[in-house]
Image (cartoon, helix red, strand yellow):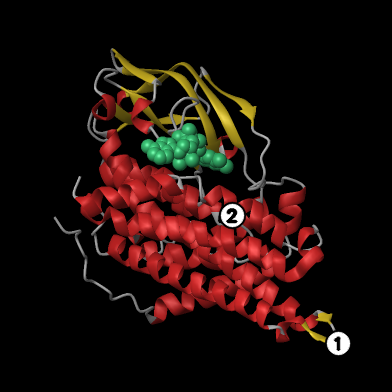
């Protein structure tokens, strides 16, 4: 069996997308670049940047206009994320988290859920977090143990989630729970859990290598009750929606990596032209030129994979048969960003190792992209499965 090859290669940026890029670039230079280092150093949630994105109506850039979004699709979302990520890896998370917490609702929720939650996220009136991972189940998401049991007109949820991003600022959580503990991936359902619910608490705030502007937390659910209408999608069918949602998300995570790597290349190139050694700018040395050229090659290749993935999502081709495109975009972009971040430090020499320059921060943040929303290994498993028709 040969792999499905989706032939659509139509992803030239249109005028609106080009204008979006210019607008976000200017906004990121003005509001994000000056803040990026202190967000990291002070481990500060960038509320000021949230307000800027809200005012510019960018929080829902990817959502349809009928739900308060800008109607620019996932391509618009990727462009926005990429431009902000050139300076800071934390600030694009406002859009990434809106994408993540809206996916399952958008794909399988009721119209009332879509109207309330998608519109709230797009307008900046609601913030969401996504709680799938558990202490013993990350890549193996089908093995989660959090339980949801129906009691009369309520669902009662109990369990523990870990590594959840931003729950302390969220109004609601999208929680995956087992509704049939004996059915593996076919016994999982999603629920909307307001963070003010009795029985819900945030446990540990993790101490992290990077991505310090957002919390990453352990969550406890001790018989948390939600009404029946907080069930999202069909009973036991949550895993499928989650996987389709991840397909949609992968170009967006790749866009974080592309932006980060572009930021590294821009910084290292400028430095190389200024820094002198042996009586000349280090940019004149072929060793430096080749490192910069290799960075460009990687970034450009990843950008094309990401845009192609986003265009497939926007065209509605995000089912399992195209999963290899989304996984390729995410894995390639994440691994490329890690390499580019490390090489850009090499271009700066000793200065690159110091916190006076942003590259060590980029390197710490790049590592997270290789892990979240499916590790680089899991992406390769998904690609191989489609490749081999397994
Ligand atoms: C900063 C941060 C923020 C996060 N935010 C969220 C969030 O908001 N919500 C959420 O639900 N989760 C979140 N996560 C969790 C993240 O999605 C998981 O960490 C990730 O899916 C990997 O799971 P794991 O950590 O349990 O690793 P494991 O699954 O234990 O994997 C460990 C290693 O084994 C490899 N591996 C596992 N299975 C296989 C296999 N079959 N074949 C080959 N190799 C394999 C992995 O690639 C990895 O290298 C976050 C994580 C981090 C670090």
Task: Please state if 149 lies on the left or on the right of 23 as rendered.
Answer: left
**Few, some or many residues within 10 Å of mark 2 (<14, 14–19, 20+):** many
Q: Looking at the rendering, which quadrant does residue 226 occupy?
A: top left
For residue 57, above or below residue 9: above
Q: Secondary structure at mark 1?
A: loop
* Residue 316 visible within the image: yes
Using the image as rendered, state which of residue 268 and residue 178 is in the foreground.
268
Horizontal and vertical percent position of residue 104: 33, 42
Q: Is residue 212 above or below residue 331?
A: above
Q: Residue at x 43, y 55 (%)?
A: 331
76 vs 68, nearest the viewer: 76
Residue furthest to the left in view is 1
Query: Badge 1 local density, few (<14 within 10 Å), some, or many (20+)?
Result: few
Q: Nearer the viewer, residue 113 or 231?
A: 231
| Residue 145 in the image, given as x and y percentages of width and height | 39, 20
Mark carried by residue 366: 2
Task: Tally the marks.
Answer: 2
Circle 1 sits on which residue?
279
Q: Which residue sits at x=45%, y=79%?
A: 18
Q: At 47% across and 30% down in the image, what residue appears? A: 194
């Amino acid at each position: 069996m040969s792999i499905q090859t989706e032939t659509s290669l139509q992803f030239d940026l249109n005028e609106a997308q080009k204008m979006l890029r210019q607008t976000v670039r200017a906004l990121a230079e003005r509001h994000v670049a000056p803040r990026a280092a202190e967000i990291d150093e002070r481990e500060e949630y960038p509320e000021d940047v949230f307000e800027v994105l809200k005012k510019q109506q960018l929080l829902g850039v990817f959502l349809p206009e009928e739900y308060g979004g800008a109607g620019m699709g996932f391509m618009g979302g990727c462009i926005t994320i990429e431009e902000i990520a050139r300076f800071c890896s934390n600030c694009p998370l406002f859009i990434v988290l809106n994408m993540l917490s809206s996916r399952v609702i958008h794909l399988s929720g009721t119209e009332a859920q879509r109207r309330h939650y998608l519109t709230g996220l797009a307008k900046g009136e609601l913030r969401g977090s996504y709680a799938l991972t558990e202490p013993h189940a990350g890549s193996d998401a089908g093995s989660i143990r959090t339980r949801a049991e129906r009691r009369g007109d309520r669902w009662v949820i109990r369990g523990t989630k870990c590594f959840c991003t931003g729950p302390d600022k969220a109004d609601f959580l999208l929680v995956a729970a087992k509704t049939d503990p004996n059915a593996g991936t076919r016994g999982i359902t999603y629920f909307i859990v307001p963070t003010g619910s009795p029985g819900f608490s945030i446990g540990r705030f993790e101490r992290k290598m990077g991505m310090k502007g957002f919390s990453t937390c352990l969550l406890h659910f001790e018989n948390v009750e939600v009404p029946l209408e907080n069930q999202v999608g069909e009973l036991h069918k949550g895993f499928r929606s989650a996987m389709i949602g991840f397909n949609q998300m992968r170009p967006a995570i790749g866009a974080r990596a592309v932006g980060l790597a572009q930021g590294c290349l821009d910084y290292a190139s400028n430095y190389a032209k200024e820094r002198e050694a042996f009586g000349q700018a280090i940019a004149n040395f072929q060793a430096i030129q080749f490192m910069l050229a290799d960075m460009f090659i990687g970034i450009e290749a990843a950008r094309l994979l990401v845009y192609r993935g986003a265009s497939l999502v926007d065209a509605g081709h995000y089912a399992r048969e195209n999963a290899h495109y989304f996984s390729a975009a995410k894995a390639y972009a994440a691994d490329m960003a890690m390499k580019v971040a490390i090489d850009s430090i090499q271009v700066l020499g000793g200065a690159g190792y110091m916190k006076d320059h942003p590259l060590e921060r980029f390197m710490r943040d790049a590592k997270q992209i290789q892990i979240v929303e499916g590790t680089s290994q899991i992406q390769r498993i998904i690609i191989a499965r489609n490749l081999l028709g397994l």
